[in-house]
Amino acid sequence: MSSISGWLLYLGGLCLLAWSLPATAFDPEHAHYWIAIGAIAIWRYSLGALHFLRGMYFQYVAFPRARRAAAALGEEAKPPAYYLLITSFRIDPATTAAVYRAAIREAAASGVSTTIVASIVELADEQLIKLLWERLTPPQHVRLRIVRIQGTGKRDALAQGFRCISRDAPDADALVAVIDGDTVLDAGVLDRTAPYFRLYPRVGALTTNEFCDVRGGYCMREWHALRFAQRHINMCSMALSRRVLTLTGRMSVFRAGIVVHPGFIHDVQHDALDHWRLGRFRFLTGDDKSSWFSLMRLGWDTWYVPDASITTVEHPPDRSFLRASRQLMFRWYGNSLRQNSRATQLGVGRLGAFATYVLWDQRISMWTSLLGLSLALLSSAAYGIELLLGYLLWIGTSRLLLTLLLACSGHRVGPAFPLLLYYNQIVGSLMKIDVMFHLDRQSWTRQKTSLDRGLNPWQSALNRWTSNAMLASSVSLFLALVVTLI
């Protein structure tokens, strides 16, 4: 009932906004304004529409065809062995228990030799995992290995786990599932992903559909649900080109021959960026982007399996939705933009035309997403409030339509989605612009640690000054463009 009330409230708000518009809102003297808004919308929504059409084609046409071909492989699709590498740090015991219980269940059901590698920091986690192991008494083909490391970050945890697997000298076609310590595997996820490595020999890794169990308030729950619905459509779109742009750290599956290679392990553990202004700095977060870039550089394909799913237990970094969402966007967008510039340097031949276009659009869309609001605010100040009201009506109606299209993903949608879509557009763009000029600023949300580059005070001050100066210059040029359009 609350969902129905929410939709009625949203529709009522749109009707009230339309009723409040004066008759002069669409006066011919404002024609240039509406033409400008429309042109920006067509430019911005063209890529979104293309993603949607490609995603729907993949989900309902291309993937079912691939699934039938994979099913025809039968027992040939089984890998020689599985490795489930789970990294945990400061996750509550209830979540840890659910994660390992699901991993042991999947390992037991796989029917092939499976090794669960727990890469952990704290003794309490080791004791909990061993207690679960004793209670669940998994079959003989399932083994457990525990790797204890210092709390130096997820990249070190992954690297030590990969080295543990490499000491087994696994078959190159064995599969390694890299799983976060807050990710619960849904039943059958291993059996649903394995066949595609046999079906597509050039696929080096793939990722899966994702749902969430958010331990937070209403806005945070809806915000994550929106994010995963959008993620699903974008993943399906990119999978059509076998160029999924991130191998999600929550759960992705790799060929064992890739993850045990010293070069790949080095890429994940010691990835760094050489920036023309900020110098060289290591990546603190974004291990999933590092693994993706390593595969792209080596010429592998990446893929997505929409009917294999996981459930992540989300613990927001702050009780305030505004603070928590900004912290998470700062980390996510920073990871993407740090990889963006060097990824495009791989060239169209390695990335493909569509993936290259999407990566370039990431740099442009952070500005174009702000054009409409900027035009509306400044135009209404110059020519009348009706322009802003008309813009808000356009935003409310268009976001409602986008929300209805998201329902085609198979993920649920809610009445808060239209407002959250616009929140992501505006606040997300502002966060991206800030991050773009401060790529060396990094931090974990759970560990509350940040990158210490060991720079002297003069170097640090120069980096801050040049970053802020370039940010201010770019914003000034953007505002000058908006004023010129008006």
Image (tube, rainbow, N blue to C red):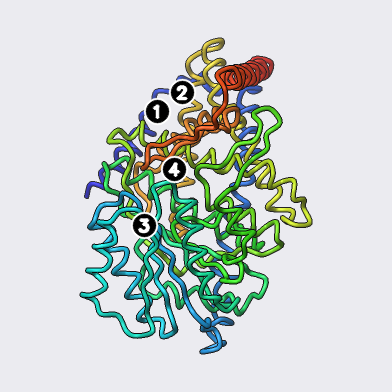
Q: Do the residues labelled 1 and 2 touch (CB within 8 Å)?
A: yes
- What is the tally of numbered marks visible in this picture? 4
Mark 1 or 4, nearer chain start: 1
Q: Name the residue under label 4.
A: 400
Q: Which of marks 3 and 1 is in front?
A: 3
Q: Name the residue under label 1.
A: 17
Query: Which x, y percent locates residue 129?
Result: 28, 65
Type of amino acid under label 2: Leu
Using the image, tell me which numbered label, if any, was put on residue 120.
3
* Disc 1/disc 4 C-alpha distance (Å): 14 Å
Mark 1 or 2, nearer chain start: 1
Left or right? Give the position of 250 relative to 287.
left
Type of amino acid under label 4: Leu
Q: Mark 2 points at which residue?
A: 389
* Disc 3/disc 1 C-alpha distance (Å): 54 Å
Query: Which x, y percent locates residue 308?
Result: 45, 69
Residue at x 39%, y 34% (from the top left corner) = 14
Query: Among all residues in the image, which is located at the extreme bottom?
Result: 75
Q: Nearer the viewer, mark 3 or mark 4?
A: 3
Query: Which x, y percent locates residue 125?
Result: 28, 58
Type of amino acid under label 3: Ile
* Disc 2/disc 4 C-alpha distance (Å): 17 Å
Q: Is residue 210 visible?
A: yes
Q: Do the residues labelled 3 and 1 touch (CB within 8 Å)?
A: no
Crowd band around label 3 with a 10 angstrom C-alpha radius: few (<14), some (14–19), many (20+): many
* Disc 1/disc 2 C-alpha distance (Å): 7 Å
Crowd band around label 1 with a 10 angstrom C-alpha radius: few (<14), some (14–19), many (20+): some
Q: Can residue 411 be seen in this view?
A: no
Residue at x 58%, y 40% (from the top left corner) = 282
